[in-house]
Image (spheres, rainbow, N blue to C red):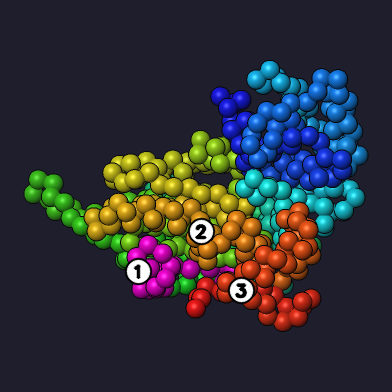
Amino acid sequence: MVEDTMFSGESKNIEYKVSLPDKSEKYMKTIVAFANTQGGKLIVGVDDKTHQIVGVENDVLFQLMDGIANAVSDSCVPQIIPDIEPQTVDGKTVIVVSVEAGKNRPYYLKSKGKDNGTYIRVAGTSRQAFPEKIKELEMEGARISWDELTCVGYPVSEEATEKLCQDIEKFRKKAGMSEHSVKKEQLINWKILKQSEGQLLATNAYALLTSDYFSFSKTQCAVFKGTDRAMFLDKREFTGPIYTQIEEAVDFVLRNIRLGATIDGLVRKEKYELPPEAIREMIINAHCHRNLLDESCIQVAVYDDRLEVTSPGGLYNGLTYEEVMNGHSKIRNKGIANIFSQMGLVEAWGSGIKRILNAAEEYGLPKPRFQEFDNMFRVELFRVNPITDQANQATNQANQDLERLDQVEDENVLSEKEIEILNLVRMQPSITQKEMANALDWNLASVKYYITKLKEKNYLKRQGSSQKGKWVILTKRD
């Protein structure tokens, strides 16, 4: 089974080389990217286009393995120690270089330095990491949680502290938890407040739990007509303490889905078309596990056929999709997670996905879908809509597979390379063409060619100068 996975095609965790490139940097990017993401295997002796097992000649096998080990040792900082071994497949020998998800992040190419030599895996390619991603990797390597850092300049007021303590008590009571008084001493123990030279200092978590201080800390909610984002029916933006955002977002969804009734004996019982506990869990998870270094906000979208919750940031610190689906959890925001636990918003670590799946199954709904990208995580809970026929459902499925934060790609019009350009622009509008070439490992002429094609198709335009301007993705085309 493992062998089938290794040789069934390239992926986020698998890359093929028919032979070793003359310049080790070309495959060292992959080694670094694996260490910075979820680990992976570089397999030498397999054609990356046909997946044909070409093999490595036995008389140079161990020489190549030693060369790989030396190149990794000489090129990568901090030190990466891969497992390098030969393996026989279909009578031919290949070299399998296995790299674990690293704990001393970020890893980078010594020759390029940290700013230009840090790579991550995106789908099946190794891409140069943007500054905000490098910053998160640094915090992962230092075992630091951003929400526990001091929020410089943010005041600690008696009024805000008292309100937070009272709200924690109210949530505990509502959740049926044991009641006890919450004071600022508990907030200090939970690392929401800090003491320094006789003063109380606010953490980023304290600011998130008591105000709308950070502009990115908001929940955008919308109802769309149909199954895409072409037409708004209603939209709201909730700010303030993140636990109030959760309540308001859940209420928004419940107001905008159907409420029916069933008769149990002589008792009439009302029932939403989607399980409220799953809705709540989706929105809580989005806030608890979002990347707070990404200035995007959480999005909650209600379509005719589904509820969709999107949070900034992919999976954290080497956690794999398979591990998440099996109930494993790594805490990105320790302060927020602790307070959510104290409030009864989080019952048991790693159980959120299972509760969503179980709630959908009990309601007789299609299995929810979980999508993980390098810069976001999305959960879709499907509505049962008798109006939607099978043809429409098939079309929607195809559209959803292509969708990123905003659905501007059109499979019938854009090539894969054009979509790669758009994805880079979406993540960093100010990126230069030279930076695109480095990130995609293309030559500059190729980047210019595809940008020209996107401009001709009216998908992309440039605002400002080549050095200080930015790219704009066009969502409406003539």
What residue is shown at x 43% (from left), y 67% (from top)? 229
Given residues 365 and 169, the one toward you in this image is 365
Q: Magenta residues?
A: 209-235
Q: Which mark is residue 411?
A: 2
Mark 2, secondary structure of its residue: loop
What residue is shown at x 51% (from left), y 76% (from top)? 477
What residue is shown at x 87% (from left), y 53% (from top)? 112
Disc 3 residue crowd, few under 14, some 14–19, many 20+, Cα 10 Å: few
Q: Residue furthest left?
A: 266
Mark 3, secondary structure of its residue: helix
Q: Which residue is mark 3?
A: 456
Mark 1, secondary structure of its residue: loop
Quadrant in which the N terminus appears: top right
Q: Which mark is residue 225?
A: 1
Kind of residue sitting beneath label 2: Glu
261 over 251 or under it: above or below: above
* Mark earlier in primary sequence (3, 2): 2
Horizontal and vertical percent position of residue 202: 67, 65
Kind of residue sitting beneath label 3: Glu
On screen, residue 35 versus residue 286, left or right, reads right
* Mark earlier in primary sequence (1, 3): 1
On screen, residue 115 versus residue 93, left or right, reads right
Disc 2 residue crowd, few under 14, some 14–19, many 20+, Cα 10 Å: few
